[in-house]
């Protein structure tokens, strides 16, 4: 299946858009989950496992630990903040203050910030000497893994939503709501556990 790229105008901004597939199908006919998404999921899990293994052998000095903790908090603000802004755009749509297409487009632009924040959290976390024998730390790792995989499927869901011409179907809206709820649960859960670990 081949596609062609063009330049589309959204508001006062020019951005690349895809032309319809040349084989006569529509974007909506494509599978929601692709082999690229599967590869991204496998790579994400491998990265998380690598980070956990590194955290068991890295012994940062106290100053480096403090720098890593500051960076960890900064990446938290970046990633979680972008998630909250993304959800805010959909709240605006629900309130009739924005179109569905605008909410989807603005959210897509936030994906690089969200992923940068999450990647930074994982990288800086390897220098924080996590106690892997702790149940709370194990739960946090589960939340981060779930958050990562949920983010990959959210990206796939966003691609499907961006192809809609009319009102979004109810099943897609429910899927989006569940995705957002799971994201919030994982982010807030990881934040609370991280806070409790630093105050012990």
Image (cartoon, helix red, strand yellow):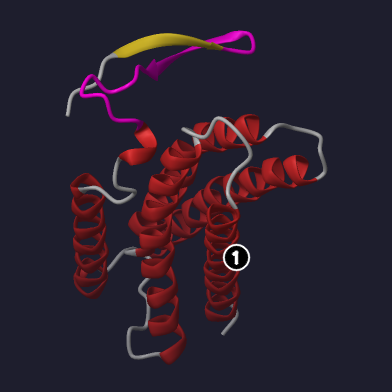
Tell me residue 84's x, y (percent): 65, 50
Tell me residue 176's x, y (percent): 55, 55
Point out the stretch of residues depicted in magenta: 10-26
Tell me residue 126's x, y (percent): 32, 64
Name the residue that disc number 1 marks: 181
| Residue positioned 44% across, 37% down in the render | 112
| Residue positioned 22% across, 54% down in the render | 38
33 relative to 182 in the view: left or right: left
- How many numbered discs sit on the rendered protein? 1
140 relative to 122 in the view: left or right: right
Vertical side of 107 occupied by 22: above or below: above
| Residue positioned 50% across, 40% down in the render | 161
Pick whichever, 144 or 3, lies toward us: 3
Pick whichever, 140 or 13, lies toward us: 13
Vertical side of 165 occupied by 185: above or below: below
Vertical side of 45 occupied by 100: above or below: above
Quarter of the image for residue 103 reads top right
Whether 18 is among the magenta residues is yes
| Residue positioned 47% across, 11% down in the render | 8
Tell me residue 43's x, y (percent): 20, 55
Direction front: furthest residue: 24
């Amino acid at each position: 299946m081949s596609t062609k790229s063009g330049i589309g105008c959204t508001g006062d901004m020019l951005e690349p858009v895809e032309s319809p597939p040349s084989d006569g199908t529509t974007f909506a006919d494509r599978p929601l989950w692709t082999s690229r998404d599967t590869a991204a999921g496998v790579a994400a899990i491998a990265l998380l496992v690598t980070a956990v293994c590194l955290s068991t052998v890295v012994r940062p000095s106290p100053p480096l630990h403090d720098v890593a903790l500051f960076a960890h908090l900064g990446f938290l603000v970046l990633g979680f903040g972008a998630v909250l802004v993304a959800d805010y755009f959909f709240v605006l749509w629900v309130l009739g203050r924005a179109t569905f297409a605008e909410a989807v487009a603005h959210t897509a632009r936030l994906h690089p910030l969200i992923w940068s924040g999450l990647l930074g959290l994982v990288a800086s976390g390897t220098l924080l000497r996590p106690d892997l024998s702790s149940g709370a730390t194990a739960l946090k790792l589960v939340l981060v893994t779930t958050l990562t995989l949920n983010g990959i499927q959210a990206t796939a869901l966003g691609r499907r939503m961006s192809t809609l011409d009319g009102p979004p179907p109810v099943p897609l809206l429910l899927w989006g709501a569940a995705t957002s709820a799971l994201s919030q649960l994982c982010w807030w859960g990881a934040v609370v556990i991280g806070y409790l670990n630093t105050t012990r």
